[in-house]
Amino acid sequence: MTAGRERRGIFRYRHGNLSVRVRRPGLAGRLLGEKTVDWMDFNRGGMAFETPQKFSLATRLWLHLSIRDEKAVEIPGVLSEVRNISDCSGRYRYGVQFDCNDTPNMDAGEIERSLADIEILLKDIFQRLQAGTA
């Protein structure tokens, strides 16, 4: 988890061409595969997304994140934990916190840099939208 940061105190980006796929860890997740979800907001510490899939609080999930704008950033798998759930009329909105330190096969620093790069790209897109140049 991102230690020492309160997610609600950090600006969250809601615009941009971020692609998010989610799956459960382990054999069941590999068999069921990744499902594309609708992302709602993002920052380098965590994100929110909506899906008809049902998860419980504290469920661990693999997230595959990718964005292509002025540069491309892809994180093929970062572990996250469900921290918040809202029922949205047959769909569920989840708030998850990224866990860079417990993600196998990738260096925590590399994941954190990639999450920061995604946040910077989303910030640039947000600023272009506000300026009317996107």
Image: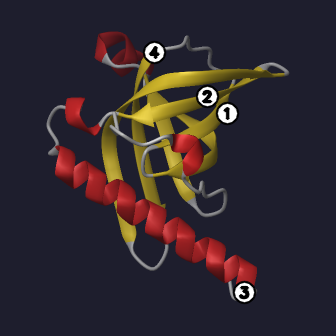
* Relative image position of residue 84 (x, y in whole percent): 60, 23
**Residue 59 numbered tag:** 4
**Residue at label 2?**
94
Q: Are marks 2 and 1 in contact (CB under 8 Å)?
A: yes
**Does label 2 or label 1 sit earlier along the sequence?**
1
Question: Could you tell whether 134 is left or right of 63 in the image?
Answer: right
Residue 23 or residue 4, whichever sits in front: 4
Residue 8 or residue 26, whichever sits in front: 8
Q: Where on the picture, by quarter, is residue 26?
A: top left
Q: Examine the rendered structure and indicate whether residue 115 appears above or below residue 92.
A: below
**Residue at label 1?**
50
Q: Secondary structure at mark 1?
A: strand
Residue type highlighted by circle 3: Ala
* Relative image position of residue 3 (x, y in whole percent): 33, 37
Q: Secondary structure at mark 3?
A: helix
**Does label 3 or label 2 sit earlier along the sequence?**
2
Q: Examine the rendered structure and indicate whether residue 74 appears above or below residue 81.
A: below
